[in-house]
Amino acid sequence: MQPKLAIVAGGGSLPIALAEACRKNERPYFLLGLEGFAEPGRLEGHPHRWGRIGAVGRVVETIREEAALEVVFAGHVRRPSLASLRPDLFTVRLLARAGARALGDDGLMRHIVRAFEAEGLRVVEVSSVLADALAPPGPLGALAPDESALEDIRRGLEVAKALGRADAGQAVVVQQGIVLAIEAAEGTDRMVARAACLRREGPGGVLVKVAKPQQDRRMDLPVVGPATVDAAAAAGLRGIAVEAGGVLVLARDAAIRPADEAGLFVTGAEPASGTPRRLS
């Protein structure tokens, strides 16, 4: 039998997708909802407890009380200000060890993983539970990008990777070679809505989303899903390109079907080559 899994849950549908995968595979699990981020209604119907993002020590204790040996982090978490964090002693010590690296999401996440591992817990990747969720290379639906869209994708990959190296966002919108918007603290869907206000005449832009080059794949792996497709269609984009093997595509059928209907391509791109693979 697989060890019990603690799903540390932020917002969005990813934590529930993990819970349902565990239930389907008869793996013991529980959701640890982060207060202010996980939506209570989503957690109903699943075994769950609650924790506070500033009380990492208590979160670790809860996982031990539940006899979970493995941990996966999933869902949106907007990091609070230090004033609102109200850290417990465990978290204070963690922040002190992180030092200046705590100012960036990636550096802080690495220290959180190390702290959990030092407590004897094994932190695993989302893809170890949702094996088929990582985007493959090439078109995921019926439509593929044309040559001008491929140029926008190449430009988007370049800019998004640079953004990731700065430990900032993970997504950009590019139209006709012009970067319309880059992701910051607002998240992808709001960034896409902002790009709609900057849309130029001609073929629509492309949303490009990648993993950070230095990213620990066990933490904050980027996600797209049906809501992303809805936002892209509403903004007048013509397609979505995600890093193959680096971005999770949730509810793939539910995302690709409306994309096809809206005339939107969704494709997996490989940064090394700068282009999606074409279907043979």
Image (cartoon, helix red, strand yellow):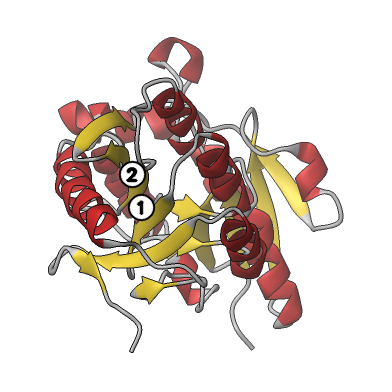
Quadrant where the N terminus is found in the figure: bottom right
Instruction: Give residue 89's position: percent from left, percent from top.
Output: 43, 28
- Nearest the eye: 276 or 210: 276
Say above or below: 137 vs 220. Answer: below
Q: Residue furthest right?
A: 45
Relative to 235, is 162 above or below? below
Quarter of the image for residue 39 reads top right
Q: Determine whether the residue tagged by mark 1 lies in a helix, strand or loop.
A: helix
The amino acid marked with disc number 1 is Val
Q: Is residue 66 visible?
A: no
Q: Mark 1 = which residue? A: 113
Q: Nearer the viewer, residue 246 or 63?
A: 246
Report helix, strand or loop for mark 2: helix
Q: Residues at badges 1 and 2 in contact (C-beta under 8 Å)?
A: yes
Looking at the rendered image, the disc whose residue lies closer to the viewer, 1 or 2, is 2
Residue at image point 46% right, 67% down: 143
Which disc is residue 109 wearing?
A: 2
Look at 64% across and 57% down and name the residue there: 258
